[in-house]
Amino acid sequence: MEIADRTAPARLRALPSWLINQAALPANRLVTDGLAGAGMRRHHYALLAALDEAGPASQADLSRGTTIDRSDMVATVNELAEQGLVERAADPTDRRRNVVTITPAGRRKLRTLDRLVGTVQDELLAPLTADEREQLVDLLARVVDHHARTSERPRARSSSR
Amino acid sequence: MEIADRTAPARLRALPSWLINQAALPANRLVTDGLAGAGMRRHHYALLAALDEAGPASQADLSRGTTIDRSDMVATVNELAEQGLVERAADPTDRRRNVVTITPAGRRKLRTLDRLVGTVQDELLAPLTADEREQLVDLLARVVDHHARTSERPRARSSSR
DNA sequence: AGTCATATGTTGGTTGTACCAACATTGGTG
DNA sequence: CACCAATGTTGGTACAACCAACATATGACT
């Protein structure tokens, strides 16, 4: 009569897509809460990381280099710029573009966030050994890579016209 | 200068929480698209599965048995009832409750969805071998279980009746 | 040179999922 | 009886991931 076990249907519990979603819930909760302590959100961290690793870039390039949509990039850059963590400047060589640059304060903040996010991974993967964590990362990376390639069709340019 | 590689920052690519999120994107896209072909959404599938496996139950029990909030359960049951896939009836023994029951049509639909969702898993995990898929499911299940237990502290019932 | 397709930043949406707060009704327990 | 808890329900929030359209600019081709 009663659903006493409080566990999801067996069908779902065996479903990779469902498990990934369920795992994403604590993952997001932990990361979001962790970053919230520093006044940041996930987009902010991703953008700072991209800038730190790849150097100054236009918003469109940053959008392609992260998974942040061009339209969401606007607000993200705004928010980071307000806090002095990045700077937005017009690109003299292409007046359509803004060049976004990480500031020293941004780099400092990023290091803080790195630590923060790092500790959160331990909480997230608490039940797994170091080996298993590596396995998980490897497996997921291959899945993610596969779909990044198949969804993003660079589309052979048809200069034919 | 330019972010030509179109890959996310290395920091993120090594982050379990980020990978889980990125994997959830194609997972959701595939499942959502698949179910959309049958006029269903994920909630509908989860609810039908729960009803099929655990039998008729109140909305609150169903909410606990899936991951669907009590408030979202209302609409989910409504939508399935409109299509004759479930039935909602007042519980004579407890007038607060509605007893939700899956109909034969609901069972038929569920079988269709099972097939649909199953084929989608193959697409999702295309780059992995059968062994690796099992590993992934096992690792994720343990992570999910761990956080299900640590977050939900139901507090031992005084009288389980 | 002029035309046309494309890239860029930006605004202003929409969708889906996961929540939370509050409420009236009912039930169970002291 | 008085009180607290559970249930269904309404209405709302937050956030990420999109999409459409636009003005401006660039570049490529004729």
Image (cartoon, coloured by chain):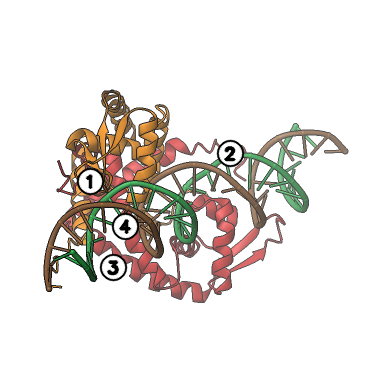
Chain colours: A orange, B red, C green, D brown
**Is the residue marked by circle 3 packed among few (<14), some (14-19), or many (20+) residues within 10 Å?**
some
Residue shown at the point (48%, 39%) measured from the top left: B152
Q: For the residues marked 1 and 2, what is the alpha-carbon distance in whole angstroms?
A: 50 Å
For the N terminus of chain B, give its image quadrant: top left
Q: For the residues marked 1 and 4, what is the alpha-carbon distance in whole angstroms?
A: 21 Å
Image-quadrant location for residue A149: bottom left
The chain to which mark 3 is attached is B
- Residue at image mark 2: B157
Q: For the residues marked 1 and 3, what is the alpha-carbon distance in whole angstroms?
A: 31 Å
- Residue at image mark 3: B119
Q: Are marks 2 and 4 in contact (CB under 8 Å)?
A: no
The amino acid at mark 2 is Arg
Say what secondary structure mark 3 lies in.
Answer: helix
The amino acid at mark 4 is Ala
Does mark 3 fall on the same chain as mark 2?
yes
Q: For the residues marked 2 and 4, what is the alpha-carbon distance in whole angstroms?
A: 37 Å
The amino acid at mark 3 is Thr
